[in-house]
Image: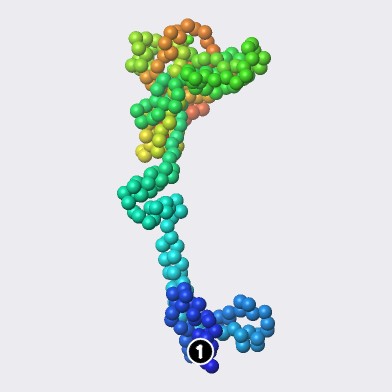
Amino acid sequence: MSSEKLVMDQGFAPSLAGLGLTRPYKRQGGRRTGLVLLAGGCLGGVLVCAVHMPLVYVTMSELQQEMTELRNLVVRFLTSRPAPTASPGTGDRRNDTAAGGAHRERRQADMTPSFGDVYVRWGREQCGDNAETIYAGVVGSEYYSHHGGGSDYQCLPLEDVEWNNPVAGFQHNSFMYGAEYQVGTGYFSTDNMESITNPYHYDVPCSACHVAGRSAHVMIPARLSCPQGWSKEYSGYLMSAHHTHQNNKNFICVDEAPNLVPGSSADVNGALLYLVEAQCGSLPCGPYISGYELTCVVCTK
Ligand SMILES: [Ca+2]
Ligand SMILES: [Ca+2]
């Protein structure tokens, strides 16, 4: 029995035929460049293997060709399988009706990842046209002259405030106060102040905003416009605490045409908001001019 016949008789070639490979291997004595020893199940010595297992001689070019065919088979097998996330129901597989198509579209829509980003619009009780107002609120933080406590400004909702086992009176020594504008006329637009022209001492609204289809936001100080490729949410003035006050605050971007909390003109202090002026010398004096009030913009992408 020739080596070629041995291969065909002992099942190796039929097993390839089952995978779609029907071309038999041929011995080519002059160009034996490769040797494949099928040793699966062979626990004996080399001679036993020689008797019970086929030695298949193939040229390297034939081996490469067979490997290409195997790879193509695997690719066809994998690409012919339906994607798990888009797999329709049994009824849909049997009958591609309009209802089945709608069902598939609905399932695909349900599984389409939705994403977005959130930011606070300081000074405005509603978000812009392209954003959803998650809630409207008022700005709060620790009292301006307290040495400790929280430091950053918060946007506290006005509606549906919820408590959990509250105890009347003060026991815990950390506080939240409302915030007031500490800025007079001449900077902010009065477009959204009703008939009021001076925002000084008025309390500060805010809104939490969700923008769909965006994955990032950035507040850029000293800018009123966004870089190319970014969408402007709003712009305004940079504000923070007075530099001599004991309670440090963060910097926030307050809308250039802010709202005022109606009826809040009383000077009761709390957390305070001041415009921020540049100090050149420590900042580069090229772009930054000492005494100028810093602007800001919030951008999404
Ligand atoms: Ca006030
Ligand atoms: Ca100034």
Residue occupying the point 31% across, 49% down:
98
Measured as percent of width and height from the top left, residue 108 is found at 40, 46
Residue occupying the point 38% across, 17% down:
188
For the residue carrying disc 1, how many other residues have a C-alpha within 10 Å: few (<14), some (14-19), or many (20+)?
A: few
| Circle 1 SS class | helix
Look at label 1 and name its amino acid. Answer: Lys
Give the residue at the far bottom of this rendering. 1
**Residue placed most toward the observer, 119 or 66:** 66
Measured as percent of width and height from the top left, residue 280 is found at 47, 25
Residue occupying the point 46% across, 67% down:
74
- The tally of labels here is 1
Colouring scheme applied when the structure was drawn: rainbow
Quarter of the rendering occupied by the N terminus: bottom right
Residue occupying the point 35% across, 12% down:
194
Residue 104 seen anywhere in this rendered image of the structure: yes
Residue 32 seen anywhere in this rendered image of the structure: no
**Residue placed most toward the observer, 287 or 153:** 153
Q: Is residue 195 left or right of residue 26?
A: left
**Residue placed most toward the observer, 8 or 73:** 8
**Above or below, comparing residue 196 to residue 134 in the picture:** above
Read off the residue under disc 1: 5
Measured as percent of width and height from the top left, residue 173 is found at 65, 16
Give the residue at the far top of this rendering. 266
Measured as percent of width and height from the top left, residue 76 is found at 42, 66
**Residue placed most toward the observer, 167 or 94:** 94
**Above or below, comparing residue 5 to residue 106 in the picture:** below
